[in-house]
Image (cartoon, rainbow, N blue to C red):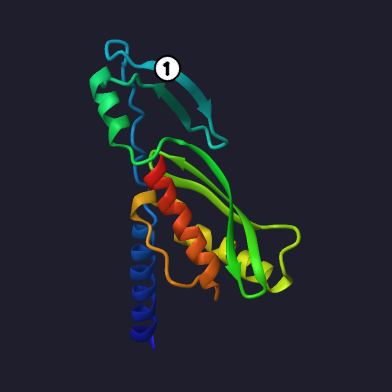
Amino acid sequence: MKNKLMIIISMIMTLSLIIAGCTTKIDQPKNEVVDVSDSGDELKEVSKTDDDKIIVGLDVPDKKSEEERSQELLMQVIEDGNYVDEVSYGAHDGVEIVTIDITVEGDVIMDASVTPSDDAHKVSKKYINGVNDALLDLVIGKKIDEIELPKQISGSSITTAALGEQLQNLVDIY
């Protein structure tokens, strides 16, 4: 019985040492101060989080030459901006009119929407809204000249074709 008790006590002590070893404190990294006074960068913002972390924002000047900036603008496919057009197309029950609104920044689509006209047929509105709901995954955050739309979005081939044609027109015209 004494042997069994000694074995159990030894096992408990060994287990407690293992557990204690797993909970040792790790030294926190030391804060580092970086002097930016000679870099041309300017201090923009200093803020403190709830857990006492300090966040420093720097205003870093654009060090590109005027020629480099001009070359970048020339290489853009489309000028930054918001493009809104009414597009009409033949639908099963006549002509549908939708408003296509696309915001582009640096050739990347930042926002897009397809809105049916007020007098659109209720079935058409369902399909148009389905296309609109899918835009986040299909076009938002993508380069305008690299978008490949499927033949149908949410079951709507006609609205999808109108959207694809509008995207291509933006690239061709602007």
Residue 149 drawn above or below residue 72: below
Q: Position of residue 104 (x, y in %)?
A: 46, 42
Residue 121 drawn above or below residue 57: below
Residue at x-position 39% and y-position 56%: 23
Q: Quadrant of residue 123?
A: bottom right
Q: Residue furthest bottom?
A: 1
Would you say 141 lies left or right of 51 here? left
**Residue 139 visible from this viewpoint:** no
Mark 1 residue type: Leu
Residue at x-position 50% and y-position 66%: 160
Mark count: 1
Would you say 110 lies left or right of 77 here? right
Helix, strand or loop at label 1? It is: strand
**Residue 62 visible from this viewpoint:** yes
Which residue, given by chain and number where applicable, does mark 1 sit on? 43
Judge the density around disc 1: few (<14), some (14-19), many (≥20) Cα neighbours within 10 Å.
few
